[in-house]
Image (tube, rainbow, N blue to C red):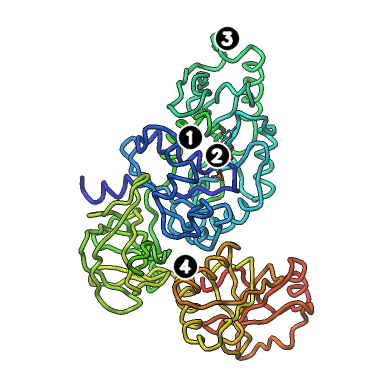
Amino acid sequence: MTNREEIERRRTFAIISHPDAGKTTLTEKLLLYGGAINQAGSVKGKQSAKHAVSDWMDIEKQRGISVTSSVLQFNYAGKCVNILDTPGHQDFSEDTYRTLMAADSAVMVIDAAKGVEAQTIKLFKVCTLRHIPIFTFINKMDREARDPFELMENIEEILGIKTYPMNWPIGCGKEFKGVFDRNTRKVLAFSSDGRANGVKKVDETEAELGDPALDELLTPYLHQQLVDEIELLDGAAEEFDLDKVLRGELSPVFFGSALTNFGVEPFLENFLRLTPTPLARVDSLTGETVDPCRDEFSAFIFKIQANMNKAHRDRIAFMRICSGKFERGMEAFHVQEGKNIKLATGTQLMAQDRAIVDEAYAGDIIGLFDPGIFSIGDTLCTGKKKVQFAGIPTFSPEHFARIEQKDTMKRKQFVKGMEQIAQEGAIQIFREVGGGMEEVVVGVVGVLQLEVLEYRLNTEYNVEIRMQQLPFEQLRWVQNDPDTYNLRDLDLTSDTKAVEDMKGNRLLLFTSDWAVRWAETHNETLKLSEFGNI
Ligand code: G4P
């Protein structure tokens, strides 16, 4: 296969959802259909299998969760599929957001009984930053579900994206009999064998709408209901428009049940048909797009995972390849450092195993052993003309704590530990405007990161800390010019605090949405942003 063929068969996406909507179950079923695993149940099981993949920290073992996200790769119908896992439960963190920067599309899993939930909204917002296509999988149709028309309305109203049902559910709960594919105009009736436990692929029977056999397969009532609903749908205004899908303005919607496998394969097939090949990224030096199929290699680092192996205090830097081909041992120019480096070992997660990668292509994600040379947002490239991809934005933390060391004699270790952990991107650190490191405010996206911080300072830097959680919930970067815009003159609620980050950017910490709105409405010229350094 040529490099171009290899690149064009790649599909790289992230699955996003609110906890418990079924992300893990759907991922596992995609692997099942992709032949990467033989039996469902091997990825799930938070106590066992997940650890095989990212077993790197005691805290993770104790909790039975994975602290950082990983990548799974499999082949299906000639395509090479990369699924980026976005941690969701207590392990929700900034990495969850950063992972979305490496994806070319997102699959949003929604619980059919609950509709759009809080975490879905946050993740969706980050996807819209990049205007990537967002596909919707409405899951758990084998349970009592909300009316499908109502679910579509719920997505449109809350997320502000148009929807187009690619298929339509026939019944729900115990009566969930199949889906109608609006593209082929065929009914896919699922055999009830799959319902038993969902460990094997499901059997499907295909029939045309109106076929008398469907009265038997679905019941005459459900058949008639389907005919009526499809008529209603076809009359509805929104047309399918692939360009709108690719711009992230229209979300193709699929109904199914990951648990019973109903609707998983039709989803996978249609999704892979519609989701883009590796997207061209923009070189921020010239503003030009970098063709993924060009010969020269380029990539950026979007995540750094520390101490995966405790025996060596190494880190793994995850890079997304944007163009060309990676070969183990190759040399590349590290743009931020301004020097050539050897990309010695690449690792990749194939289903449950971590493997050494000899070659990889644009669209792929691999982990590089990092002796401490990489930072999030770094670009690597080969060729005469260097490129540089835009940095990864800093996302607004949602939990804050004041941190001080117990033993003031260990000041050096404390500062070093805090700075290194912040540099990996696990936490953000702030100080009083113009202040030092005596009192540090730490901000994190997921509350577990605070525990991770305490644990790591203790075990890796031998520093004990006192931590006091602070009531702030929101943070905004101040965009106004620091030389001319004085924060002291602002009209703010008394519980709002001004701080600066390690780069000297100024920020405001707020205790509520209400306080943010106060600041915005009472200070006309104040410019605030939810994301830093875009
Ligand atoms: P998450 O990764 O989004 O957090 O969700 P996960 O897949 O872990 O699923 C959450 C729960 O919902 C699991 O049940 C899972 O079995 C169930 N589930 C997922 N998809 C479906 C579906 O299509 N239909 C139904 N009825 N249930 C579904 P659990 O009891 O929390 O875990 P477990 O005991 O099954 O492991």
Type of the residue with mark 2 = Phe
Earlier residue among tags 2 and 4: 2
Image spot of residue 35 (x, y percent): 35, 35
Earlier residue among tags 1 and 3: 3
Q: Is residue 207 left or right of residue 476?
A: left
Q: Looking at the picture, does residue 177 appear above or below residue 343? A: above
For the point 59% across and 44% down, which residue is it?
A: 20
Q: Give me the C-alpha separation between circle 2 and circle 3.
A: 28 Å
In terms of secondary structure, where does tag 1 sit?
helix
Q: Tell me, yes or no, if residue 239 can be seen here.
A: no
Q: Is residue 180 left or right of residue 432?
A: left
Label 4, on which residue?
392
Earlier residue among tags 2 and 3: 2
Q: How many C-alpha atoms fall within 10 Å of the one at disc 2: few (<14), some, or many (≥20)?
A: many
Q: Looking at the picture, does residue 70 appear above or below residue 507? A: above
Label 1, on which residue?
267
**Proximity of marks 4 and 1: CB atoms separated by less than 8 Å:** no
Which residue is more in the foreground, 482 or 328? 328
Q: Give me the C-alpha separation between circle 4 and circle 3.
A: 55 Å
Earlier residue among tags 1 and 2: 2
Q: Tell me, yes or no, if residue 513 can be seen here.
A: yes
**Proximity of marks 1 and 2: CB atoms separated by less than 8 Å:** yes
Label 3, on which residue?
216
* Number of the label disc, if any, that sits on residue 137: 2
For the point 56% across and 8% down, which residue is it?
A: 212
For the point 53% across and 32% down, which residue is it?
A: 259
**Proximity of marks 2 and 4: CB atoms separated by less than 8 Å:** no
Earlier residue among tags 4 and 3: 3
Q: Give me the C-alpha separation between circle 4 and circle 1.
A: 31 Å
**Proximity of marks 2 and 3: CB atoms separated by less than 8 Å:** no
Q: Looking at the picture, does residue 279 appear above or below residue 418? A: above
Which residue is more in the foreground, 361 or 290? 361
